[in-house]
């Protein structure tokens, strides 16, 4: 009984936190750079392609998607967030791009919260839908999250910074790597290990790769900043000293790419422009992940504008691909890129 009370209490706190995260996210504007401004692509004055022949489609996990962009993990668990998930799923279906749901832990402990995640699969029946739990979750709970939404893949999030900034956050970070390995061995779908905005280094990517991880979502610094969001929620301790902490997205991408040529990389963290998508693919990302931009458009301007944002990204991507002489995503991934400024200095210190 005591345990049950404790679980109920924990879950109502989780539900409150889910709604509060959205509210705090909307109030917060990020001030960190993702360093893509230090990546340069060169104009190809002789592309020898017709604009209408540019093809942004690509393959991921056995399915063809319209462009190398996914709606990354955001939410679920409450009535308000079920509505958000329904709309995000509509966008992912209509534009044929993958979508990850937010952490499903709340629904693993409370069946009533399941509908807020299941709605995503109900709306997008054929597309790529990705489950999400903490990398600390038991293998049993991770598999339940996948079953809950018949997911094509499973995201395991690493969020040490976020947990430490949360009054009620986890303080146990030992044994996560072997837990990830166990989950990979038991899961029947691809497993993606992801950060939530603080980046993954060369060293960590190497350890993950050795542990059997094939997909990493680098979740770098430069977009949604959970240190700032959680600092705003914490009434006990001031965590604003962490608001510039993290590996900028473009640097994290270079680091993870250098760690292993076999890793499939999802580049996320402050992706808001087609130019960044194109740069990320040329630097070795399979696709990019966007949370903040699409969520903000959806909540502030509605689903139509959020859809137009995705259309604009696609149109502008095609323009960049033309100007780079890359007819498709395979060709785009081979386009040379150049580094300058702080990004080059940091990369050089480690790798050259
Ligand atoms: C309101 C909100 C809630 C989020 N919840 C989750 C979550 O439950 N699980 C997770 O892995 N990432 C979560 N994220 C992190 C995003 O998936 C992503 O890693 C991060 O926001 C950086 O991408 P962005 O700059 O495009 O927003 C959340 C992001 C936002 C904005």
Image: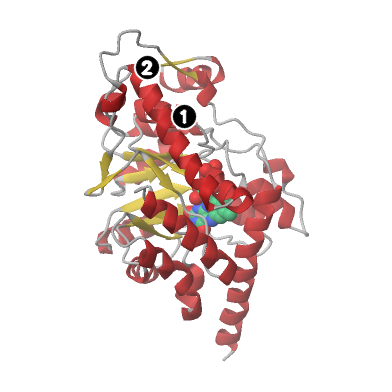
Determine which quarter of the picture holds residue 284: top left
User: Which residue does the image show at 69% across and 61% down from the upper left?
Assistant: 167
User: Which residue does the image show at 52% across and 20% down from the upper left?
Assistant: 38
Could you tell me residue 222's position as x and y percent? 57, 35
Q: Secondary structure at mark 1?
A: helix
Determine which quarter of the picture holds residue 218: top left
What residue did someone put label 1 on? 276
Number of numbered discs visible in the structure rendering: 2
Q: Give left or right: position of 4 versus 13.
A: left
What residue did someone put label 2 on? 323
Q: CA distance from mark 1 to mark 2?
A: 15 Å
Give the vertical position of 135 relative to 71 (above or below): below
Give the vertical position of 221 relative to 351 (above or below): below
Could you tell me residue 287's position as x and y percent? 36, 39
Bin the neighbour count of mark 2 within 10 Å (Cα to Cα): few under 14, some 14-19, many 20 and up: many
Q: Give left or right: position of 255 versus 22.
A: left
Q: Work out which residue is located at the far top of the displayed protein and give it.
A: 45
Q: Is residue 283 visible to the viewer in this orientation of the structure?
A: no
Could you tell me residue 234's position as x and y percent? 73, 57
Determine which quarter of the picture holds residue 235: bottom right
């Amino acid at each position: 009984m005591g345990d049950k009370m404790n679980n109920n209490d924990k879950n109502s706190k989780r539900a409150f936190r889910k709604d509060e995260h959205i509210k705090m996210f909307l109030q917060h504007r990020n001030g960190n750079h993702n360093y893509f401004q230090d990546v340069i692509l060169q104009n190809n004055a002789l592309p020898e392609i017709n604009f209408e022949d540019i093809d942004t489609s690509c393959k991921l996990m056995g399915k063809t998607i319209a462009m190398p962009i996914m709606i990354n993990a955001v939410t679920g668990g409450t009535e308000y967030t079920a509505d958000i998930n329904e709309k995000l799923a509509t966008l992912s279906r209509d534009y044929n791009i993958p979508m990850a749901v937010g952490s499903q832990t709340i629904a693993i402990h409370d069946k009533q919260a399941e509908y807020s995640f299941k709605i995503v699969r109900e709306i997008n029946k054929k597309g790529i839908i990705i489950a999400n739990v903490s990398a600390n979750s038991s293998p049993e709970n991770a598999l339940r999250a996948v079953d809950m939404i018949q997911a094509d893949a499973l995201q395991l999030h690493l969020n040490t910074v976020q947990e430490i900034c949360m009054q009620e956050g986890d303080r146990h970070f030992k044994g996560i790597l072997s837990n990830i390995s166990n989950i990979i061995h038991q899961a029947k779908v691809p497993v993606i290990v992801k950060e939530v905005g603080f980046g993954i280094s060369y060293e960590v990517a190497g350890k993950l790769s050795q542990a059997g991880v094939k997909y990493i979502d680098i979740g770098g610094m430069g977009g949604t900043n959970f240190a700032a969001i959680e600092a705003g929620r914490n009434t006990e301790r001031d965590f604003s000293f962490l608001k510039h902490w993290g590996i900028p997205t473009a640097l994290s991408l270079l680091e993870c790419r250098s760690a292993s040529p076999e890793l499939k990389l999802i580049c996320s963290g402050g992706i808001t422009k087609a130019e960044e998508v194109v740069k990320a693919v040329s630097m070795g990302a399979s696709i990019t992940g966007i949370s903040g931009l699409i969520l903000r458009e959806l909540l502030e301007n509605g689903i139509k504008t959020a859809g137009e944002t995705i259309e604009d990204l696609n149109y502008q991507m095609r323009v960049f691909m033309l100007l780079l002489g890359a007819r498709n995503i395979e060709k785009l991934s081979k386009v040379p890129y150049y580094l300058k400024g702080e990004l080059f200095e940091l990369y050089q210190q480690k790798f050259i």
